[in-house]
Amino acid sequence: MSIFKSFLPGKAQVFGRRTFLKHVAVTYTALGTYLLNTRFSLAAALVTTPETLPEIAAQSAVQTTDVLRYHTVIVDGNNEILPWYTPIENAYDHYLDQLWTWLSTVPNGPSSSLPMYYLYCGFQPGNPITPDSYENDWGERIPNFVEFGRLYYAYTGNMAPLNIAKNLADYALAHGMTPSNYAWPNFPYSAANGGATEINGDNVAWNQNDILIDHGSEIGVSFYTLYLVYGTSAYRTAAINVVDTLAGKIQPGSATNSPWPYVVNASTGAVRSRYTSNFAGALTLFDLLIEHGEPKAAAYTTARQTLKNWILQYPMQNGNWVDGHSDVFIDGNTNWSNTTKSNMNLYLLDNPDFDPNFRTDVLRLLQWTEINMVNVNTNDGLSGQYYGASVVAEQFAYMMRMGYQTSRQAAEYAGYYAVTGDQTYKDKAYRGFNYSTYMMQSNGESSDGPTDNVGYWWSDVYGEGPRMFFYGFKAVPEWAPPRENHILYSKTVLKNVAYASASVRYTATDDQGTEYLRLAFLPNVVTVNGEALSLVIDLNAEGYTVRELGNGDYAVALKRARIGDVVISSGGVPITFTIAATAGTGGTITPSGNIVVNQQGNQTFSIAANSGYAIADVNVDGVSVGAVTSYTFTDVTVNHMIAASFSAINNTGGIIGYNGPGTTTDNISDASGCYINATRFLATANLNVTTIKAKILGITGRYKCAIYSDSGGSPWTLLKESTEVTNPTTGWQTFALSSAQNIQNGTYYWLAIWSNVRSASAGIYCDRSGATTRWTNALTYGTWPNPVTTVRGNSYRFCIYAEDLGSSSNSPPTLATVVSANPNPVTGTSTSLSVLGGDDGGEANLSYTWATTGTPPASVTFSANGTNAAKNTIATFTKAGSYSFQVTIKDQGNLTAISSVSITVNQTLTTISVSPASASVAAGATLQFTGTAKDQFTDNLIVPPTFTWNVSGGGVINTSGVFTAGSAAGGPFSVTATSGGKSGTANISVTTGTNILGNNLVGAGNDVSGRNDLNCGRFRATASFTANNMRINLASALTGRMKLAIYADNNGSPGALLMTTNEVINPSSGWVTFNLTSGYAVTSGSYYWLAVWANVNYTPKCQTTGGTARYITRTYGAWPNPLSGTLGPYSNNESIYVSNG
C-alpha cells in the first residue's frame, strides 16, 4: 500500500491540481474499492476541535496579524472572522459586484477572439493573466454561470452577468453538442482539452466523445432557464432533447450502479464509469419541464419518480455522494464529493416535499460534510476550523480546502437556520461566507482557496461560490445591504426586473413561486397581474409577509400561485428630497429652483453660459466641483444644493490649438482604413469657438473635424463636430461647428480630424514635437465615435485650431424665459410647454425644437415643433410616468441654447369596469365581482383604488364585491362599483331550480378510454351556484371502479384539484350520479375542468366536436394535484356535468 501512503489524510503535502490528480488516478486504479470501503473512512483522521457556541460580539471589529489569502483577518469580540471589506453590512454585496465586474474585463485567449473563460478551466494570475490550459470544465461552468447570472439579475436588474452566461450557452449549441445519430444524441459535452475550440470531450480523465451525464443534465437546466428569460426556442429544444434522452435511458439503479452511468461514450453508448449521485440537476430539469407542461411531461414524471426512489434508497442512506468533477477518473462509489452532497442538500431546501424526512436528512447532510470534509486532515495541512469558520475540502481525490466549497456549506447552514431557527447554524453560515470573501482581491480577481496551488477556476470562483450567497440572503435578509431594494432569492426564473425607489417589478415565469426581498420602503400594495395579494401571517397560502428590519428597511416574502407581472410598491406618495438649484449672472442652470427628487432617485443639472460669459465654477453642497457643464446627483437620500457662477469672457476672440505653418506633414489614412487623429491643447482663455481651421493636403474626398474632452491624457467625450469640406485644395481650410462650443480656461481639449480617403494622400501639416497626438485603429468613415478610443500616439503638433471670432461674430441665443409646463404634474393627457429665447439677430429668427430625453415611458407628440411658433407648444402623452423634455433654441448661425423641464404625468382614475359583466347566480349562492380601474390612457391603475359596491336588488353585496343572492328569482339587477366619482356596472340575475356546469346532453359518439386513463374536459360556468353532485353518461356498464373530480383552469390547461366525488363500483350504463365530498361554490364566468378516472376500460358518451378535452394515463389511485402533463387538446365534448340538484 506504499503507493498511497503520501496521500493519506494527515500528510501535509501540497501538490498542484494537475500533478495531484494524475497520482490519484493511479492510486485509485491500484487500490480499487479498498480505499474508502466500510473499513476505512476519513473520519478516522478526525481533528477534534471543540465547538464554541456563537455569542453576540460585544466589541468592535479587531484587526489581527494573520493574513488570509489577500487580506488581513478581521475578527469580532469573540475572535471570530468578519468580512475584510467595510462597511461590513455591504461586504457581501461588494463581493458579488466586484466578481462579475472583473470577469467582464477578462481578455481573450491566445490567438482567439473569445474571452479566456470560453476555452480554459481557469487562469494563472499575472499582468496580464494567462490561461490555465489543464482542461476546459465546460459542464461545470455553464450551469454555475447561468445560475449566478439569473440570481444576480433578479438581485440587481443588471443582465450583464447573465448575458455572459447566455453567450457561453450559445457557443455550446454551436460547438458542444453530440451529433443526432449518436447513441446519446443532441446531448451536451461536459469537457474539452484546454484551448480546443470544439467541445467534444477531453483527455485529462476521459476520452474524446465521452460525456458526463450529470453535468449534461445541469446544462439542460441552463438551456431551459435561458429559454424562460430570453424566449429563444432553440434553448427549449435543446433542453427537451436532453430530458428526452434522460427519460428514455433511465434505469432503477442499485448501490453500485446509478440510474444513468456517470460517463458514457456518446457515439457507441459504451459505459465508461458506472456511478455518480450528482443528479440534483437532473431532478431540477425534470421539475422545470413538468411544471411548464411540456408535451412529454408524463414520461418525465415517471422518470423523475424512478430517480427519486433511487436517491432516497441509496445515497441518502449510505452517504455515497460521488462525482469526479470532470477531471478525475473514477468507476465506482468511492470518490466522495462535497459538491454532489451540497447540490442535493440545496435541492432539498428548495423542495422540502421531496423527502419525507426532510429536516432530519438536511442535518445529516450538513454533518456528512463536517465529518468527511471539514474536521479531517487534508493534503494542504490546513485546519478545518479558522476563526470560527468551517473550511471545506472539495473531494476525496483532491482533499484541499476551498473557498467556494466553504460557501456551499455556509449556504446549507443558512437554509437549515431558516427551517429551524437554530442560531448556531446562522452563525456557522455567517463565518463561512465571511471566510470566502477573503479569496477575492479588492479588484475582483479571485482564487479557489487559501493557497496558490488550488487554482483559479472560472466555474468555482465566478459562478459556484458567489451564487451561494443568495441562499444566505434568503435566510438572513440582514446580510443584504441596508437602504436598498433587492430580490434576495427566487427558486423560479424571473424576468423584466425593474427597481425604483418605492417599487419593485418583475415577471414570474412559473405559476408557483416564492420570492424573498429586502426593501427600503414599506410595501403597502402587492399585486400579481393587477390583482392584490393580502398581507398574511404565514405563507401557507398566497400572500406576502413583512418583517421590520429597522431604519426603514423590511424583509418581505411573497408567495404566489400564478404566472405574471408582480408589482410591489409603497402604494402612497414616495419619500422626496429637495435640491436647491441657482445660477448667477451670465448663465443658467436647468432645471432651476427647488427641485423635488424621489428617495434614491437621480437628478441631472445642465449648466450653460450666456454669450460673452464662461462657467466659472459649480458648487455642490458648499464644495467646488469645477467648471462643469452638467452634474448628476445619484441615490438621493438627503437635501442638496447646487449653485453655478459665471465670468465674463474676452470679447476680442481667440483660439485654442496651433496656427503655425508646420514643418512637415503627417498622413491620417492609409489602405487599411480611415484613422481619427487628435492633438491635445490647453485652453489659455475662456472662449466660445464656432469654427475649426486645419492646414490639410488637397484630396478628392472629404475631411471633417471635431472637439473631444480630455480624460486622463486621452480624448474621450465628443463635444462638438464640424461640417464636411469636400475636395479641398492644399492649405488652410475652415470647418464650421454645428453650434458654439464653450472652452474653459485651463482645461485640456482634443482637436480631431478625419478623412474618408483610404490612402496616404489624406494628411495634415504639423511639427514633429510640441504636443501630444493620438489616433484610433482603422475605422470606417462615418459617425464620430462617442466616446472615442485611441490606441497609439506621438509628440506631433498638428496645424489645427478652434477659433472664437470675438464680439463681431454671431452670439448664441440666450434664455429670456426658461421652459415651463402647465399643468405640472399632469392629470390629463397633455400639457402646455412654453419657453422664450433672446438673440442678437432678433427673437423672430430663432427656432424651437422639442424632444424627450432619457427613456420616456412612451412617445410624445408636439402640436408645433422646429419653428419659431413652437416656443409655445402642447405635448400630448399616451402613458403616465415621468418625462424629461429639452428644448433647443437655434439662431440663423446654428448657435444654440438649451433649456429643460421634468414633468410627471399622474394616473387619473377615468373609467371603472366590473367583471363578470353579466352573470346568473342560483338563489342563495354567492358570486365574486371584481372592479378594474383604468387611467386616462386606458391602462390599469398601478395602485388600485378602494371600491364602494352597491346592487339594485336580488340580494346583497359586501364591501369586497361578493354578491349573495336572495331566495327569489329575478333580474337583471345592476351591480355598481364606485370610486373617486367614477363608476362601473354589471348585470346579475337570480335563478331558481337546477344549475349545471358542463354538458348534460347525451352525445352521439363514444370516447373509448383505456384502463387508468384520466379524461378531463374544459367548461365555462354560466351561473354561480353551490354544486353537490356530478354525473357522467356511460355507453356501457363496466366492472371496476370509477370516480370524478373538479380541477381549476390554468391558462387553458387543468391545474389544481378543487373537489372530488365518492367512488362508484361497477357503474351501470347511462347517467351515473356521484356525490361531491362537500358542496363546491361554482363561479359564473370561470372555467373548470371536469375529470373522470377508472381502473378499467370505459366508454363515456360524447359529442366528437365542439369540446376541449385532455387526458393522461396514470395508475388509478390518489388524484394528482396539480394535474400536469396531460395530452391534447382534442375536440371531444364528454357528457359530464356538475349540478346543484
Image: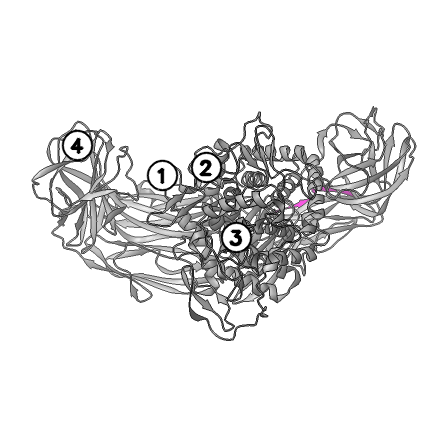
The amino acid on which the numbered mark 1 sits, given as a three-letter code, is: Pro
Mark 4: secondary structure: loop
Q: Residue at coordinates 90% horizontally, 28% vertically from top-left?
A: 1036
The amino acid on which the numbered mark 3 sits, given as a three-letter code, is: Phe
Mark 1: secondary structure: loop
Front tag of 4 and 1 = 1
Q: Position of residue 221 (x, y in %)?
A: 58, 41
User: Which of these two is toward me, 365 or 13?
Assistant: 13
First in sequence, mark 4 or 1: give its number. Answer: 1
Q: Give how far apart the Cα atoms at labels 2 and 4 are.
A: 48 Å
Residue carrying label 4: 762
Mark 2: secondary structure: loop
Span colored in magenta: 912-921
- Model colouring: one colour
Front tag of 2 and 4 = 2
User: Which of these two is toward me, 374 or 575?
Assistant: 374
Examine the residues drawn in magenta and state their main secondary structure.
Answer: strand
Q: Give how far apart the Cα atoms at labels 1 and 2 are.
A: 15 Å
Q: Give how far apart the Cα atoms at labels 4 and 1 are.
A: 35 Å
Dot 1 surroundings within 10 Å: few (below 14), some, or many (20 or more)? few
First in sequence, mark 2 or 4: give its number. Answer: 2
Dot 3 surroundings within 10 Å: few (below 14), some, or many (20 or more)? many
Dot 4 surroundings within 10 Å: few (below 14), some, or many (20 or more)? many
Tag shown at residue 110: 1
Q: Quadrant of residue 1086?
A: top right
Q: Give how far apart the Cα atoms at labels 3 and 1 are.
A: 35 Å
Q: Give how far apart the Cα atoms at labels 4 and 3 are.
A: 70 Å
Front tag of 3 and 1 = 3
Residue carrying label 2: 193
The magenta stretch spans residue 913: yes
> Quick check: marks 1 and 2 in contact, CB under 8 Å?
no
Residue carrying label 3: 7
